Image (cartoon, rainbow, N blue to C red):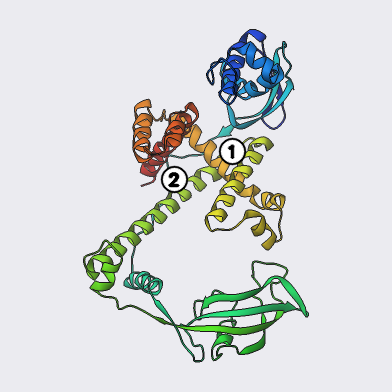
Amino acid sequence: MKVDIKKLPKSEAELTVEVSNYELKPFLTNAAARMSKGMKISGFRPGKAPYDIVKKQVGEAQIYQEAVEDVVKKTFPKAVLDHKLKTVGQPKIEIEKLAPGNPLVYKAKVALLPDITLGDYKNVKAKKEEVKLEKKEIDEALKKLQQMRGKEISVDRAAKKGDKVEVDFDVYVDKVPIEGGSSKKHPLVIGQNSFIPGFEENLIGLTKNKVKEFKLRFPKDYHKKDLAGKEAEFKVKMQAVYKIELPKLNDEFAKTLGKFKNFAELQKNIEENLKKEKKAQAERKFESKILKDIIKNSKFAEIPDLLINSELDKMLKEMEQNIARQGLKFDDYLKSIKKSKEDLKKELKPQAEQRIKTALVMQHIAQKENIEASDKEVEEEIKKAKEQYKDNQEVVKQLESPEYKMYLKNFLTSKKTMEFLKNLAK
């Protein structure tokens, strides 16, 4: 394998990698075997047809195309290690030459680990917040559970606070309907403040089929900037009113939740969960204070654009997954906030740079203090994960991959480094 390296500005480099015909041979053989598994070739079992037979069926160019990803996955890390390059993030790969009978040539643009001068991380002054849980927080959690178990009873009377209602509504600004400002049989509970201030109050007193028109002003900090602070006309028709009959908070209520013998046990469980959640929040704040202090007192070389873009892509992916978990489509979300992915990237860039600096600081401290997760620790974590996902062989297979082991080793090393820093800050 031949590797040429060209240094670029902003801590980046371009590798030109040439893989010889001899080195390509095992990759092509494996690719042909994979392809033959999905083919019916007379006289051969799936996956057992010789290379030349598969070549006649699909053409050698297709085999090269099938093999190229595996070639890059295997040869790129070797090129980095052989030349002692400290890369970060994902490389940008471009295939330069891919033709049967010729060496494979590709270019990999990589971000190199930016130079960093660490600030004083051994004398960071940070305190963990004391965790306090008030009785009203437990009561609020119980109230939410009670409301979730409430029984809806249709009533023929005027709506009042606490009722669940279904309404048709249309919203206009300057007599023009706003985007997403119309709904039919929209459910809401009066008093939960799920709409702009004043909307739910205007529903009080309405009976079924009654229509009401009123004006309200959108809050100045409304998430849709084109509506923020503007006055709008609302036209509402009451479709249904439901009284919510709440269950009594007693032993019987606790038993309906499945795993509790009595109400006292339910209260204790809620208290423990709230304390656990508050402790986790305090821990995250403590860690954030430590890292911000170290970053503030450290000096960084210019961060490569490739690394920033890679982090931004990761952040958008995380955002997309969070929105999907709420049952929404990312494209619809973007339309609702009137922004493109590029707009979001511009907004998130400072946060992406901060995340990169955090990773760099952690990496340098781990190296300086010889902190590293052992192979045994990695294997123990994989063993636990395998037990958890034992019924999903696809996941188990991913857990055994070299990529996952590397990710886990980095994650555990980072975790140990954070513990080291927290002990210093105490």
Q: Residues within 10 Å of mark 1 (few under 14, many from 20)?
A: some
Query: Which quarter of the figure is the N terminus placed in?
Result: top right
Q: Are the residues tagged 2 and 1 within 8 Å (C-beta)?
A: no
Distance of label 2 from label 1 (alpha carbons): 16 Å
Can residue 407 be spotted in the picture? yes
- On the image, numbered disc 1 is attached to which residue? 299
Of pointers 2 and 1, the one earlier in the residue sequence: 2
Q: Nearer the viewer, residue 423 or 237?
A: 237
- Residue extending farthest to the front is 42
Q: Quadrant of residue 395?
A: top left
The kind of residue on which mark 1 rests is: Lys
Give the numbered dot on residue 405.
Answer: none
Q: Residue at x 33, y 66 (%)?
A: 133
Q: Is residue 363 left or right of residue 257?
A: right
Residue 136, relative to residue 273: is it above or below? Answer: below
The kind of residue on which mark 2 rests is: Val
Give the numbered dot on residue 124.
Answer: 2
Q: Residue at x 57, y 55 (%)?
A: 323
